[in-house]
Image: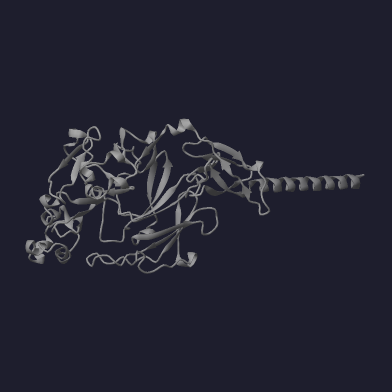
Amino acid sequence: MCRSSLGNLKSAFKVFIYFVLLTGSINAFAQVDVTVKGVVKDTIGGLPGAGIKVTGTNRGTSTDGDGSYTIKLPRSGRLLFTAIGFKPKTLAVADYTPNAQGVYTINVTLDSDVGALDEVAIVGFGTQKKSSMVSSITTINPKELKGPTSNLTTMLAGRVAGMISYQRSGEPGSDNANFFIRGLGTFGTGKQDPLILIDGAESTPNDMARLQPDDIAAFSVLKDATASTGVEKNLGWWNTIAAGDFDHDGDVDYIVGNTGLNTFYQATDQYPMYITAKDFDNNDSYDAFPSLFLKDQNGQMKEFPAHTRDDIVKQVISMRNKFQNYKSYAVATMDSVITPEMRKGAVRLKATDLKSCYLRNDGHGKFTLIPLPIEAQMSQLAGIVVDDFDHDGNLDVILNGNDYGTDVSTGRYDAFNGLMLKGDGKGGFKPLTIMQSGIYIPGDGKG
């Protein structure tokens, strides 16, 4: 009797153990991530930039230029598909059958949302949500920009309420017009000229004057064009950019390359760097002079030219007479090299931040600029490649840098041998050594 009871107990114990192991296996299987691929499209074709997010998590991605996407999530997960101007759609992975390799294919067709389209404004260089815009937009039909004058800048007068166009000369070659877009209220202190964008690139009235009306697809005048993005005060010498969803939240973030911190140049909000450019000697070529703040003989911070006397004489020969010896130039501030009178009409670019950064997309048109690790600041960045190089489901970054074409006074940038930044899927990056990554890219990256 005792032996029989003991045998039954052992059998029951075995069954209990098997049940626990089986249940544990099922739970473990349910938690394993599966791969889902597919295409998000409308009635016409693939939708680039559509968002795909795992509901209840911060994990997500976006479609490429063809509307294709790939994402990993638990088999029990649900995917939310969104795109501006379309109704969102949520689908459960468990409702689909994987292929022989265990990969799920979920193709989605989104239906247009006419009500949502009313919240989108079309501007001359793209589209923006109305919620991120303030004040007004005026669009000019390019067909209206035709008249007896061949200069586009003089055709704008009278086309937009509040726009004032004025010429300083009628002489051919000097007849470009400047203009204000807020009427007489524009006059006063601060920046008065409008920001001109041609195909998304900052331009000048001189650039506009070279355009033919027949080459213009759309022309928009935006007053107080967009609301704050959160990074408009971070002015840098940005020279390269790469996109990717580095924090799995379904929107596009960026890695932006800058000059770096291993440089003679230094820039802060209080003491920025400038480049002042103009054809100072009227020889039909721009002369560009970088400047930065240094202490003068009295210990006060003043703006000084970054170039040596020899460098500026090569650009503007009249500087030889202005500064006849090195001693006089050594104490010359920027105001004495290029006087305020000479500076009129010059392009003046400003930089307050030289760090290469991770530009995190916080949604709703807001961004946060986060400096990359110090190992990425050793030289200016010339190339950025984004991919999941170690196949852990998180985007990594490979950087290339250096520039041998800089001025003698600055010295060439040659301290960078390439770098791999391992992404953690949360917007963080760990620099890997050459031995860890195998990445070694010496030489002139910009060349």
State the residue at coordinates (20%, 55%).
Answer: 277
Residue 262 point in image, percent of width and height: 31, 61
Residue 402 sits above or below residue 343 on the image: below
Residue 415 in picture, x, y percent from top left: 34, 66
Q: Is residue 387 left or right of residue 176?
A: right
Residue lying farthest to the front in this orientation? 148
Residue 265 as seen in the image, left or right of residue 394: left
Image quadrant where one finds the C terminus: bottom left
Residue 303, horizontal then vertical, whole percent? 17, 54
Which residue sits at x=19%, y=43%? 178
Residue shown at 16% from the left, 53% from the top: 302
Which is more toward the observer, 328 or 203?
A: 203
Q: Residue furthest top?
A: 115
Quarter of the image with the N terminus in it: top right
- Quick one: which residue is furthest to the bottom in this view? 443
Q: Nearest the camera: 259 or 342?
A: 342
Q: Position of residue 240 (x, y in %)?
A: 36, 56
Residue at 14%, 58% (x, y): give it: 282
141 or 125, which lies in front? 141
Task: Please tell me whether residue 380 is drawn above or below residue 17 in the rendered image.
Answer: below
Q: How many marks?
A: 0
Instruction: Say whether residue 191 is visible.
Output: no
- Residue 380 visible in this rendered orientation of the protein: yes
Its colouring scheme is: one colour
